[in-house]
Image (tube, rainbow, N blue to C red):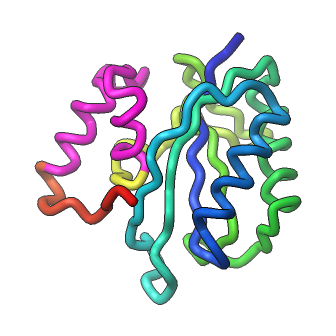
Amino acid sequence: MPRVIVGLGSNQGNPKENLDKAVAALAQLGTVEQTAPYILSKPEGYDAQPDFVNTVAILQTDISPAELLLKLKELEKQLGRVPTFPNGPRVIDLDILFYDDQEIFDTDVILFVPHPRLHQREFVLKPLSYIQPDLIHPTFQKSITQLYRELMRNKGEPSCKIL
């Protein structure tokens, strides 16, 4: 059964509670194998909003990538996500980061896996490094640990902290 890594984030209401509910809801779609520690991160793109709480979860599911994307969008709505603007505040955000070791570029449903900016996002790489440090990014052919170290070398001080 395919292993999917889902990124989760929230900065509205009670973010930890929102993430707990989202992880429980993911279990409707398959088996949640593991969840990374929650981290606190600064918002990207639009700074005038609260900090985010983020994590990643490993999900085993037999749902196809395109169908999984649709189901995650449905879950977001069920969990209280209201459309705002790009990089704006959100009750919950669910993203497919990896789907097995596949590279998927499906413009019909606007799905790009691995997530195209994953290697630039400390708030994804840091929690992922706790549960899948040796996972190889299929595009860059580098481990999550290597990508995280490179990002930190270029970025300098870490901006995310474990909660």
Residue at x 78% of width, y 57% of height:
76
- Relative side of 125 to 102, left or right: left
Q: Position of residue 41 (x, y in %)?
A: 39, 66
Q: Position of residue 104 (x, y in %)?
A: 62, 27
The answer to whether residue 29 is above or below residue 115 is above
Q: Position of residue 11 (x, y in %)?
A: 57, 73
Quadrant assignment, res 61:
top right
The residue furthest bottom is 48
Is residue 135 covered in magenta? Answer: yes
Q: Which residues are magenta?
A: 124-152
- Relative side of 158 to 112, left or right: left
Residue at x 55% of width, y 71% of height:
87
The answer to whether residue 121 is above or below residue 114 is below
Q: Position of residue 75 (x, y in %)?
A: 83, 51
**Toward the viewer: 32 or 141?**
32
Quadrant placement of the N terminus: top right
Quadrant assignment, res 83:
bottom right
The answer to whether residue 21 is above or below residue 7 is below
The answer to whether residue 54 is above or below residue 91 is above
- Relative side of 153 to 2, left or right: left
Is residue 104 covered in magenta? Answer: no
